Each structure stands twice: as C-alpha cells, then as structure tokens.
Amino acid sequence: MEAPHEPVRSRDGEETRPSEDVSPHEVPQSFETRPVSEATLQDAGQLIVELFSTIGHEFRTPLAVIKGYNSMLLLHGQRLSSEERREFHAAIQQASDRLELLIEQVLELAHLETGAVHLDEGTVDIPRLAREAITKAQQHVPEPLRDRVTFHLHLRDESRNETQAVPLVRGDPRRVHKMLTQLLDNAIRFSPEGGRIDVIVQPVAQARMASAPVPPQNSAFFLEICVCDYGIGIPEEHLERIFERFHRVETEVTREVQSLGLGLAVCWHLVALHRGRIWAESCPAGGSAFHLWLPTAEPPSMR
C-alpha cells in the first residue's frame, strides 16, 4: 500500500510536508478476536514462559534495586538523613514502576499474540485523545530535557490545510490512546538531545487509497496519525523489523535507553485488530516518522 505523505521538516520548525515514496508495514485485517480455547490458553502460557526466560535479566535489574535500597532502609534507616531516605524511596518507586511496566507489557503481548483480546469498539475522537496523550507524554519527559522537548498537534483536511475538525475513528478508545502514548514515548526516548515532536492528524485522500498497491478491503476511509521527531532516526535495514518483539536498533545511544522492544510490538498488534496500517521511516532532515492509519467511522465530508 502507498504510504501517506510524510513531513519533510526543517530544524527551525517549518511546516511539515509529506513524501510519497514510502511503503507501509501492512498488518492483518481483522477486528475480530479468536475464542479463548484450551489450546489458546496453552499457547499463552508457553509464550509467557518464553518471554520471561528471554528477558529474565531485565526483571532482575529493578528487583535488585528494590531489594538493595529496601535492605539499606531496614538496616540503617535510623542513621540516614531525611534526604537520603527520600532518595532511597524514590529509587524504589522508580524500580517498582519499571517492573510493573515490564510485567504489563509481557502479559499484554501474550494476550495479543494468542488472540485473547477483546476490543470495546466505539467512536474515537483522535484530536482529544492526542491532546491527552501529549499531556501525559510531557509529564514523562526526563527532567534534563523538560525545556528542550516541545509537542505540536496539527489537524488537517484531505488537502493538508489546517482545520479544526477531522473524522471520528472506529475503534477502542483505550487501546487507541495506548497506541498514541507508545508512539510519543518512543519519540521522546529516541530524541536524547530533545527537540520538536509533531503529531499530524489528517484524512487519507480517497485518490491515494484507490491507487495504493494493496488497497484496504474493509474500510473506504482512513485517518492518518503521524508522529515525527528529530532524534537519532532508524537505519534503513531495521525499518522492516522495528515492530518485532525484542527488536532494538543497537547504537551507542539506544544502549542507554531502557526498553525491551515490546512497546512497538504491542502497538502493531493493536493496529492489526483495528484493521489499520502502521509503519516507520527515517526522515531526510533527521529523526523518525511513525505513520498510523485507522478506519474512520464516517467520510471526512460528514464533519
């Protein structure tokens, strides 16, 4: 399928402009979930064992932090200053949050890969969810980057003109919010020097849909969400595998990023359940762009 136009962006914050030569990473076209049979549950159990055995060291790290700081508090708490105790409690909280996220991602991926996921289908207001996801993302920007990371939401019509309204999407609001949060988190983590992060929301022009090599079969209209950053980018050879579980782009910068490589895999499966499309590309001006197409609940002209 033909990719939506990707922003060609300049470092001084010029308007984004899409390109026309990117092929999307196609996903299965099914909104339905499989029945949870005994075989499905066995598959889920096997997958969880595989996941935990593969990433055991990732779990041991936060556990070691929690155990170490807690032991210090139990043994020497009375001799520690109030500031030291606060630092220890903060470290324990951070490690606990990390461990909770790891477990949540492993279990969610297991459920998704075995088809044991139910979507609460409804209509989704993407601009509202995007604003909520941006607010949440701002709170998770590392302290040293707070003044150097800016978010910009652009709403556009089919002709790429600024607008105040875009079509509603058909899907599960909670899951769509998770997808947006994941893409924004990815943009932040792989922008080690900070910079501008653009979220562009626009309908996919019908003419482009009709001329796509693999046109969508279950929806006549799609809404595009593009999350663009100015970070380290993605090498060409990794683009086709970026949504595989545990896949990470190994560079000097990414080695410093704490990530299992499960977030984008979860995102890929959620897009699949929504009969959507998702893919990534590196931008000529630097950084990465993640493209997400979701089926709309109405034609663009109805809003």
Image (cartoon, rainbow, N blue to C red):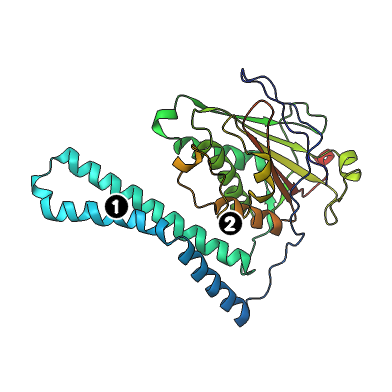
Query: Considering only order in the chain, which callout, 2 or 1, is on the residue closer to the N terminus?
Result: 1
**Left or right for 168, reference 191:** right
Q: Residue furthest top?
A: 12
Q: Secondary structure at mark 2?
A: loop
Type of the residue with mark 1? Val
How far is disc 1 from disc 2 in space, using C-alphas?
26 Å
Q: Is residue 298 left or right of residue 95?
A: right
Q: Are marks 1 and 2 in contact (CB under 8 Å)?
A: no
Can residue 109 be spotted in the picture? yes
What type is the residue that disc 2 sits on? Arg
Quadrant of the snapshot with the C terminus: top right
x and y percentages locating residue 117 in the rendered image: 62, 66
Residue under label 2, please give it: 245
82 to 229, vertically: above or below: below
64 displayed left or right of 33: left
Q: Residue at x 38, y 51 (%)?
A: 97
The residue pinned by badge 1 equals 65
